[in-house]
Amino acid sequence: MNTLKKLKSIDAIYWFVAVFFIAALVFVPGFANLAALERLLSQGCVLIILACGVHLTVLNGGVDFTSTALLALTTVVGGSIMSTKGPLGGSAGALILGLLVMVLLGLGFGIINGFSITTFKMPSFIVTMATQMIVNGLAVVYTGGSSVTGMPSAFAKFGKGSIFIFPYLLIVAVGVALVMHIITTKTLFGRQLYAVGTNHKAALISGVSPRKTIFKAYVLSGVCAGIAGIVMLAYMQSGSVNYGATMFNDIMGSIIVGGTSPAGGRGKIANTVMGALLINMIDSVLNILGIPYYFITLIKGLIILVAASIDLIRMDRKVAR
Amino acid sequence: MKKEMLRKAFGIAMAGVMAISMVGCGGGGSSSAASETKSSAAPEASAPAEPSSAPSEAASAVESAVSAASEAGTEKSDITIGVSWCAIESQMWAEYQNTIKAECESLGVKYTESVAENDVQKQNQQIEDFISQGVDAIIIAPADGEAVVSAIQECNTANIPVIMANRAAGEGCEVYATISSDNKAMVKREIEYIVSITPEGTKYRCLELVGSLTDVNAIARQEGFEETIAEYPDMFELVSTVPTEWKGDQALAGVQNTFSADDTVNFIFSPSDALLPSIISGLQQLDKYAKVGEEGHVTLVTFVGAADAVSAIREGYVDVVSVQDATNQAKLCVQAAVDAAGGKEAQDYTDAGFEVSTQNVETDYADFTGY
């Protein structure tokens, strides 16, 4: 009886991921082999990291449009620093400097976003939309639109290497997700994040500083975008201003399918990670099945809608109880 | 009540999975279309449909390539080709897509496709999924030739031959064949055509529209235009260069802004017919859309060979279009893929293209309607 209760208490997203994965293993030719599973895991890493970052901003009722643009900017800037065709010739120092600059770029734009939103009391979607445009523009100006290639061989090995079917990149993604999970569940900042997202005024009265909390959320989101840029650069072995061009829907899809409320105050990092895995699996499986792109978009939209509806029904029931 | 809710949730989840499974088991839409015709493919392989454009050199190239393919006819029904599109956003790409589908059916090979909406990461992912799918060859129309190198390397590792459609890949990977146009030379020829018909003393003040800066074809066309007009400094002056990212709205804004700043512009170079409707709309709004020879005519030079452009040339509004033969290129892509899957040697093919202008549209190209 206890087991049944435990099963019932598991969030819908876990059932979706499990059912979809098993169905894909059984029904989709070409999916149930180790190389395909390794590719699937590699493909999901960037989405997981970006979704974890944006998740924090959604938790307090905001959004961060800058993340995908930062992904592109960090790959071209970091890539040009560490490239063997660059002035530093792809040396170890260039590699370290490139990685550092990528994280700092994310951090810097996170600070700009957080500062603008908290100091000028501007809506997050306006601020991050504006910085998204600025970042996109900077990436094009920096590269002239062309791609950055010639990554050092050590970085290439990191991007393509794996332990059994688990890519090295997955270690980074899981590491980021774990840190974000600990931050949101085990720290004072995490509790403040939920408090501000649930009721801004109540949080303020109870001694929480919404300004500091929101600022930190955007800074962390920016850092995540910088790390996602590193993973993307390692995986693709090139930097491009086009990276992430259509990824924002998948990021928000991951967060919403994972049961995070767009209004803020509710959501779990682990569920967002599951959401990202589901979205990534849907893409891959339907591609393998040879289903046309526009049909994939339609199916993905329907599944997101159904998953989100089921989660909302469950939440309503919990509230009613 | 609780059980009912749980049943509903489970039912919806299963329905979703079942629906996907059913779609997948149905052969996956486009992927099944060609395979259904495989039994009758071999006799048709040597007699594909004629290209919509009628340039004789292109047609003979197709014929020789197709006849070579027919030698391996008995094996084609086992071949599956994956086609990765950057995006189907212009008449040229639509023609490419339709021709590849038709050619696969004609040759009796299975066909599956994905569209990346110009997202290079998504395109890499889709190419990797083709590897999982176990296709025999992959045709890639890349959003960014450099950024797709990583995915091509994976294809190399998996021993799956890659054919580049219309755009070349960057360095660091092996491709079986690249089927593309000589963009730079084609633009040079159409500008030289303008020079040849222009009365001495005429001064062109030019607006140059540029495609995507990550597209090697766009860059080649830009270089072709700028290098050629630089050879005639007394005739051409570059007033403004506007990047469009192949987007019509940016082309329209570019035309409007340039003419607002300088009303004396009398020449527009468009790197693609896909931008032409926006350019025409902009000129109409500015009351500058006049026929060749009429007062106030803005010389329009474009590229690709879409039906809109050829029609505008026939009506006398557009001066010249450099046509890249998408029909022929698409057929050669399929042919190269079939040859590659069959273990044959292939070679790069460069589409020389041809120019359709107000002077030859009713004579040399009377039957050419564009795509």
Image (spheres, coloured by chain):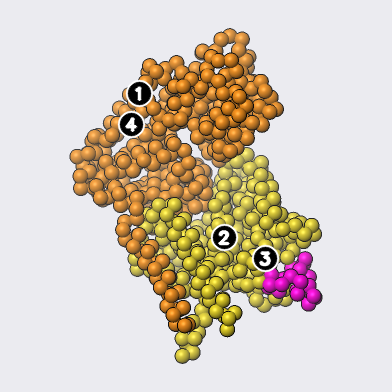
Task: Describe the element under mark 1 as helix, strand or loop.
Answer: loop
Amino acid type for the residue under numbered disc 4:
Pro
- Given the image, on which type of amino acid does mark 1 rest? Asp
- Residue A208 is covered by the magenta coloring: yes
Amino acid type, callout 2: Ile
At numbered mark 3, what does the secondary structure look like: helix, strand or loop?
loop
Residue B77: numbered disc: none
Of the two numbered discs 3 and 2 in the rendering, the one whose residue sits closer to the viewer = 3
The residue singled out by tag 1 in the image is B367
Q: Which residue is mark 4?
A: B51
Q: Which residue is mark 2?
A: A251
Which residue is pictured at 33% across the width and 24% down the height? B56
The front one of A239 and B111 is: B111
In this view, the residue in front, A167 or B76, is: B76
For the residues bearing labels 1 and 3, Cβ distance under 8 angstroms: no
Three-letter amino acid code at the position of disc 3 = Gly
Classify A262 as above or below A81.
Answer: below
Q: Earlier in the sequence, mark 3 or mark 2?
A: 3
Spatial CA distance of label 1 from label 3 is 61 Å
**Which secondary structure, mark 4?**
loop
Query: How many angstroms separate mark 4 from mark 2 (CA)?
Result: 43 Å
Residue lying farthest bottom?
A1
State the separation of the CA atoms marked 1 and 2: 50 Å
Looking at the image, which residue is at 58% across and 25% down? B268
Q: Is residue A163 visible to the viewer in this orientation of the structure?
A: no
Q: Which mark is residue A61?
A: 3
- Same chain check for tags 1 and 2: no
Colour in which chain A is shown? yellow
Question: Which-is-in-front pick, marks 1 and 2?
Answer: 1
Chain letter, colour orange in render: B
Magenta-colored span: A194-213
